[in-house]
Image: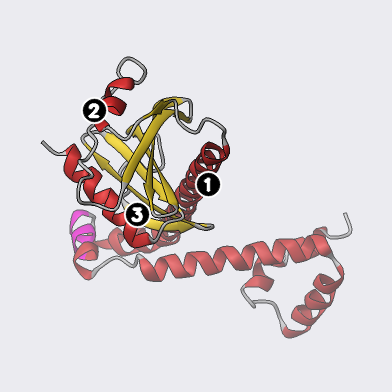
Amino acid sequence: MACDSWRNKIEAYADAELPADEMRAMSEHVRGCASCTSDVLSRIQLKSVIKIAGERFSPSLAFRQRVQKDLPAKKSSAWLWGWMPKLAASAALVVIAFFFFRGWISSQQSRTIAELADLHVATLASSTPVDVLSTDRHTVKPWFQGKIPFTFNLPDLGNTPFTLEGGRMSYLNQAPGAQLIFKIGNHRISVFIFQNRPDWPFASANGRSRSLTFNVETWTEDELRYFVIGDAEANDIHKLSELLKIAARP
């Protein structure tokens, strides 16, 4: 192959260990060869990642002393430094995996919130937004009995700006739950309640956020996952969330 002689020099080229004339020749070749350019770039990126990981995860003096104490005196130093590149590479992979997983979780959370926002909009656009129409929590709550595999409490909304309009069945990742509609001023807020599941990206996450034009608050209470979403002010979303939290506690 035409590039075989060049490929044998890529490692040394990435380390800048070739003689000056060969470095210049290799540079000219790389500029005109996409395949060798890719190989060089991969090696440089790998070395960069290993270097960063090695600096971030450099073993402490105490750790080195413990290792050296457990090994024969003549071999301890050579063994440790021989394994350092492998340890650094492993640490780099751990770091990459961590950030990849965190990004995946964030993506899954955003996707779930977007799905709930769609359900909220579809409900409000429907000619029959609720299956049980009532402002009485003692009417709405019993309607869900036998329809979902859990029970929940609704707050007393007396002396608050919120009004309960009713509720309906809802599904998230094929799991059944309750969707309750509350009103404040000209705004309507959906409260979704599902059984909390460890395979969901929100298994233990609590927090407040904003998705498109909606404010969102989510938390877990008594093994249930609550989502409060609407175009009302973030402060109003939080006030309703606090009322629901108080109602859920014995």
Residue 5: x and y in percent read 81, 62
Residue 143: x and y in percent read 32, 21
- Describe the element under mark 2 as helix, strand or loop: helix
Give the mark nearest the N terminus, 1 or 3. Answer: 1
Quarter of the rendering occupied by the C terminus: top left
Decide if residue 149 is in sight here.
no
Q: Residue at x 45, y 30 (%)?
A: 130
Gap in Å between the C-alphas at discs 1 and 2?
Answer: 31 Å
Q: Residue at x 20, y 46 (%)?
A: 158
Residue found at the very far left of the displayed protein: 250
Q: Main secondary structure of the magenta part?
A: helix
Disc marking residue 114: 1
Number of other residues with Cα within 10 Å of mark 1, as a class: few under 14, some 14 to 19, many 20 or more: some
Q: Residue at x 62, y 68 (%)?
A: 44
On whether residue 178 falls in the magenta region, the answer is: no
Gap in Å between the C-alphas at discs 1 and 3?
Answer: 17 Å
Give the mark nearest the N terminus, 1 or 2. Answer: 1
**Labels 2 & 3 near each other (Cβ < 8 A):** no
Q: Across the whole image, how many numbered discs are drawn on residues?
A: 3
The residue that mark 2 highlights is 138
Q: Mark 1 or mark 2, which is nearer to you?
A: 2
Instruction: Please state which amino acid type lies under the numbered disc 3.
Output: Ile
Instruction: Please state which amino acid type lies under the numbered disc 1.
Output: Ala
Q: In the rendered image of this protein, does residue 14 appear above or below residue 117?
A: below
Q: Mark 1 or mark 3, which is nearer to you?
A: 3
Q: Tell me where residue 23 sits by quadrant.
A: bottom right
Colour scheme: secondary structure
Q: Over which residues does the magenta segment extend?
A: 65-70
The residue that mark 3 highlights is 237
Q: Tell me where residue 2 sits by quadrant.
A: bottom right
